């Protein structure tokens, strides 16, 4: 089943022609409408006319999350705010979020690729889609929502959390499609078991899970616990949100919607483009986006491209399940967390040179974050109540910055590892 | 007023041992010890025979510590002996943040260390100076006891 067969199964030649035409248009737009890109082109001695073939893309400059931060909040928008109908935000590397804007056409595009993705995962207009992704600044909730509406399915916008209610709705509303983070899917499966509900007695058929890394083992667990087929969905707000790529029934890589995005894999060190099949950092160029078109955006996600044709008939390239990150970003319960965000909170609270470490664990199916903070002289008090107050204050500030409850643990000075690199600031004990 | 040394320690085996070894190696005698613990950490509160030297040694060993002003009071070692002191502070509406006893060598009386909030410390001193059966001690006197 396809949502838009002529696009999804477009012969490669035609697809590449379409990409080139759209890429040229996109380069023209950003050159003329986004001063940031015009400067970048001029610095590199490039003009839009230098793009004559798809491989010319390799000559063009990259865009990074730092560029988005430097141009916070609207600096990279290619249209006046008047044309923007929606603004989403995701974690930035410091206290400030990464802001993206969508025109009406962008929302239509997003809904279209989400509808395609839902159909690829087995949904149709008869489906009852229980959307347990969070609604809000995060793109997960509204992304699935608009796609499901375009598809004509019945969307239940329950948002995340409240497991008892999730299960009640799943039973009573006859949910057929579940959308949430994979760890929450496992959590729901466990909750069903505890309540003595046989998943086979439910109408659940399929699930679309993303926003955090998962593995084939987790897939098996979800499929067993919920008696469904579990599909991986990929996306990031900078590019669009969920549905940049989706796993079809073949469950062998995620089709990236190439009529809207051009994927490349680069070596994160040399920044050279790698051939299909080789693992490296995924770079995406948005070729139809109006609000905030991004040229060669470095996703920091590690994967490889599968160029072989897929059994499902879709001609769009596939990317492998994500293998990791080229930076120290963590994904905890679907939320992107950068260690530097924690640092900015500690600096804000008056710490001069904070030493801290993030420890992520998986308790059952839910991720927990512990932040160890070396107690500085200024923080220390002989009164336990003062330390508890400080712990609470840090916890609240961190919650308001990253949206996650973290356990704050004070540790002795010098007890955390010192390193030149950043890696030791994060200890990820999750077995995914 | 007495200077107590307050030390931050993680709540794990071996931490206190490390602290005590450092003090022993530097020939610093502990006159009194109190530990307040939470699940993750504890605060060790010490009255040292040589406070300055103690703090210097601890800081040199990168141990998080601070000095805190506390009161020391001598009360009769008999039923109700401590009650006079607590009663007087209660009457004056002064909260005791924490208290613990000090082991004297040369008196039969009991000695209690009391921590009150900094802003009411002066008031606490004035109150206890007027309280019968309570004798406030200065550092020199305390460490001689």
Image: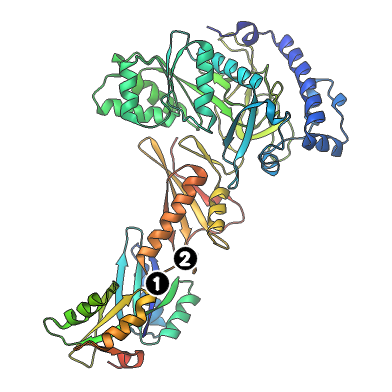
Residue at numbered disc 2:
A379
Q: Secondary structure at mark 2?
A: loop
Give the residue drawn at x 72%, y 22%. A287
Say above or below: B104 vs A419: below
The answer to whether residue A353 is seen in the rendering is yes
Question: Which disc number belongs to residue B89?
Answer: none
Give the residue drawn at x 71%, y 28%. A293
Instruction: State the separation of the CA atoms marked 2 and 1.
Output: 12 Å
> Quadrant of the rendered structure where residue B55 is?
bottom left
Residue B42 percent coordinates (x, y): 35, 65
The answer to whether residue B10 is seen in the rendering is no
| Structural crowding at the residue carrying mark 2, measured as other residues with C-alpha within 10 Å and reported as few (<14), some (14–19) or many (≥20) | some
Q: How many marks?
A: 2
| Structural crowding at the residue carrying mark 1, measured as other residues with C-alpha within 10 Å and reported as few (<14), some (14–19) or many (≥20) | many
Residue A115 percent coordinates (x, y): 54, 14
Chain for mark 2?
A
Q: Quadrant of the C terminus of chain B?
A: bottom left
Residue B139 percent coordinates (x, y): 35, 89
Question: In the depicted view, which residue is nearer to us: A235 or B19?
Answer: A235
Give the residue drawn at x 31%, y 18%. A171
Residue at numbered disc 1:
B7
> Quadrant of the rendered structure where residue A132 is?
top left
Chain for mark 1?
B
Q: Quadrant of the N terminus of chain B?
A: bottom left
Question: In the depicted view, which residue is nearer to us: A290 or A8?
Answer: A290
């Amino acid at each position: 089943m396809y949502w838009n067969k002529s696009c999804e199964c477009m012969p490669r030649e035609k697809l590449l022609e379409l990409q080139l035409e759209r890429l040229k248009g996109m380069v023209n737009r950003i050159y003329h409408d986004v001063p940031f890109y015009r400067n970048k082109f001029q610095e590199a001695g490039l003009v839009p006319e230098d793009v004559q073939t798809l491989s010319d893309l390799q000559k063009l400059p990259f865009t990074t999350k730092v560029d988005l931060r430097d141009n916070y909040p609207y600096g990279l928008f290619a249209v006046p705010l008047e044309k923007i109908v929606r603004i989403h935000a995701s974690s930035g590397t410091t206290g400030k979020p990464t802001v993206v804007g969508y025109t009406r056409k962008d929302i239509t595009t997003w809904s279209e690729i989400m509808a395609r993705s839902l159909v690829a995962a087995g949904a149709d207009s008869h489906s009852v889609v229980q959307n347990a992704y969070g609604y809000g600044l995060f793109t997960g909730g509204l992304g699935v929502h608009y796609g499901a509406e375009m598809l004509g399915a019945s969307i239940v916008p329950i948002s995340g959390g409240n497991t008892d209610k999730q299960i009640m709705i799943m039973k009573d509303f006859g949910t057929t499609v579940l959308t949430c983070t994979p760890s929450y899917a496992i959590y729901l499966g466990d909750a069903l078991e505890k309540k003595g509900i046989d998943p086979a007695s439910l109408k659940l058929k399929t699930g679309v899970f993303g926003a955090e890394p998962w593995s084939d083992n987790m897939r098996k667990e979800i499929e067993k616990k919920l008696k469904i087929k579990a599909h991986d969905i990929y996306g990031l707000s900078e590019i669009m949100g969920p549905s940049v790529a989706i796993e079809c029934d073949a469950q062998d890589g995620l089709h990236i919607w190439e009529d809207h995005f051009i994927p490349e894999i680069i070596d994160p060190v040399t920044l050279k483009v790698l051939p299909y099949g080789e693992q490296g950092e995924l770079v995406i160029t948005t070729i139809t986006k109006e609000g905030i078109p991004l040229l060669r955006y470095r996703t920091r996600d590690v994967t490889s491209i599968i160029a072989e044709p897929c059994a499902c008939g879709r001609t769009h390239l596939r990317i492998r399940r994500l293998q990791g990150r080229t930076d120290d970003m963590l994904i905890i319960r679907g939320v992107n967390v950068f260690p530097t965000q924690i640092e900015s909170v500690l600096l804000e609270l008056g710490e001069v040179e904070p030493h801290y470490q993030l420890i992520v664990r998986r308790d059952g199916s839910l991720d927990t974050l512990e932040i160890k903070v070396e107690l500085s002289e200024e923080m220390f008090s002989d009164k336990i109540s003062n330390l508890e107050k400080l712990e609470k204050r840090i916890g609240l500030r961190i919650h308001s910055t990253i949206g996650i409850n973290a356990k704050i643990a004070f540790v002795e000075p010098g007890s955390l590892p010192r390193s030149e690199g950043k890696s030791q600031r994060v200890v990820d004990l999750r077995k995914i | 007023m007495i200077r107590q040394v307050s030390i931050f320690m993680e709540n794990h085996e071996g931490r206190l041992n490390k602290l005590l070894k450092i003090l022993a190696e530097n020939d610093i005698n502990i006159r009194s010890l109190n530990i307040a613990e939470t699940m993750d950490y504890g605060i060790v509160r010490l009255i040292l025979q040589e406070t300055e030297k103690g703090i210097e040694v601890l800081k040199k060993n990168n141990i998080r510590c601070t000095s805190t002003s506390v009161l020391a009071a001598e009360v009769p070692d008999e039923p109700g002996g401590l009650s006079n002191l607590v009663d007087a502070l209660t009457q004056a509406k002064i909260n005791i943040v924490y208290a613990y006893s000090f082991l004297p060598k040369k008196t039969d009386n009991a000695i209690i260390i009391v921590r009150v909030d900094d802003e009411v410390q002066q008031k606490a001193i004035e109150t206890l100076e007027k309280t019968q059966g309570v004798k406030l001690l200065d550092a020199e006197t305390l460490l001689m006891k």
